[in-house]
Amino acid sequence: MSNNSIQPPIHAGNGPPGYCPRCQEMMSFDGFLQLVSEQGFEHLPRQECEVSAKGGCPLCSFFCDLGPLSGRFFFETENHSWRDGSQPLMLFLSRGIEDPFPMLTGKPGDLPTLAPDSPEARSYLVGKPKFDEAIVVYAPVFTTESDPASWFIMSRPPLGYADESKVFATARSWIEDCRCNHAETCPLNTNVALPSRLIDVGDNMIAPDVRLRVTEQGDTGEYTALSYCWGGPQPVTLTLGNLDSMRQIIPLKDLPRTLQDAVRLTRGIGQRYLWVDALCIIQDSDEDKQREIQRMDLIYKNAVITMSAAAASAVSQGFLNRQPEPLPTLKWQLDVPDVGTHTIFISTLLDMYWPDDPLDRRGWVLQESYLSPRLLILSKQEPIWHCLAARLMTPKGSYLEYAIFRKRFPIRWPSDLEKPGHLLWGELVQHFTQRLLTNKEDRLNALAGIAADLQRLWEDDYIYGLWKHCFVELLVWLTVPPASLSSGGRSSRAPTWSWASLNSPIFFHHSDQILATVKITSTMNGFPHVLLTCRTKNVEAVTEEGLKCEWDFAEYASSSFPGAILMLVGKFHHEYDNGIDAQGIIGIPAGQLTGRFHRIGSFVMSFLSEESWRASWEAIEPEQIILE
């Protein structure tokens, strides 16, 4: 019988129902001993695995579903020898990608022990072709703390939130670790200036009430902050009418569930004060709102932690005392002679876990996560820790591997930035403008905290969503897809040259050679004028085939704009074919005043070579344009 044919199982009939004979064999005790050996367990070639999958075997189906786009592929080659069917799949029980194959330390009792190199070691089912080094299966394997398998399977299920005491203890350990070991990257000031108002949660875990504390100039201390989705009108807010009564008492039972949970968590980690926008900003006072919005950067930067109620889409949902959503797994019951049944689970997620939390889609929340040195993310499955010094951390032993891109601004910028400011800001704006805002007019307000922080760090002027030191670089933006005039047109909150004048997702063209200069002048009334010195062309006179107009509004594509001009800002060189893109702004005359223009879009004009670019643009003398 060839090595590629299906072998009869060692313990036929002892495996779990619904699995093919080879997978049943793997899940037997004899199969387990092979999995943890240096030789591994020989499974099936690809074609036979596909036949088994079509017959209903869930594990074979999982193996076959893994593909090049899956996060479970690490050392993938395009045509490795398992995919083309020439070799069987060899499976191993492993403790991680750094050491993908078993290390045995002996056999206490009847079972081998996988040797973890740290308390954070995780267990995996790893698969590779028999004579090939391309790892094609890499699935987390876990068991519960109380199961007999827990002494050789290192990974555990997500912590969840059913036992809030474990959540509190985990959060305290993360804070203490950051306090003791990250002093340089995550300074934890114990005597920071306190915000204007805080919620005093007291020091009793079961106290039924909290109260509002109005601070005075010079008051210092520690506090936590809450980042959360309102999800509509709030049942309890601070107003001019109830400010005095809230200073006396706020019954905890009157607060929505997320705020109640934030109070409990603040108490559970040993903190006395909590900042919540709905209760610490006077909601019916525009003056107070504007004043507090300008302080957002310090409120979140100075908090001991920011609690991010990421999984709740509304303030009524809360985050404690709930079970995590079930994730796809296969149950493996390993019968060990003279010991009993060990229950092991194989994660069948085809990729890294992406929680897609509702909070990650909210515009206001972006600056709260960017500015907070320490984030306690109350995600769907379990708490996650993220500070300036540490990557995302999950509770000890959790099998979940997260694919979360949570970019953070460092607490201070180095003098030699790894990226130019326009690239950093462009990425942030692109991220922000793809999020949701209940009130579209908050497009600039929702970034005011980050802007205030960067004004100090960069020692620069922030001008309607752009920065003075890289103003020209940030002028060439586009909206994808284009906005629609039927949805309200351009907002009056910002000038036409600012991305903040639109409500659509924004992206930037980045030139590697800037060809324009700018001078910004203030006006007696209205927005500042931008005096742009650049080469221009009349749009109707352009004959080159490589022109692509990117209109701010979809309706503009079928419109005619007499007098519209292309304003050249920069060019980008393509390394792969020596081509060049001319990049800039499209403008139309602003009323009857000569030389004044409103932006209506951006453009890219592609050339095959430097010579063709020069023939089109170089002979044109720069002129001064006023953008409004």
Image (tube, helix red, strand yellow):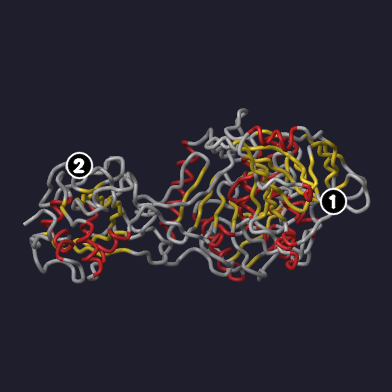
Residue 461's label in the rendered image is none
Residue position for label 2: 103
Q: Nearer the viewer, residue 379 or 551?
A: 551
Q: Nearer the viewer, residue 489 or 282?
A: 489
The image quarter containing residue 536 is top right
Q: Quadrant of the N terminus?
A: bottom left
Residue at the farthest top position = 415
Task: Please tell me which residue is depicted at 59% across the width and 38% down the height of the picture.
Answer: 579
Percent across and percent down for residue 270 are 51, 51
Secondary structure under tag 1 reads loop
Percent across and percent down for residue 439 are 71, 63
The kind of residue on which mark 2 rests is: Met
Secondary structure under tag 2 reads loop
Q: Nearer the viewer, mark 2 or mark 1?
A: 1
Whichever of labels 2 and 1 marks the residue nearer the N terminus, that label is: 2
Q: Is residue 190 left or right of residue 521?
A: left
Q: Is residue 194 visible?
A: no
Residue position for label 1: 563
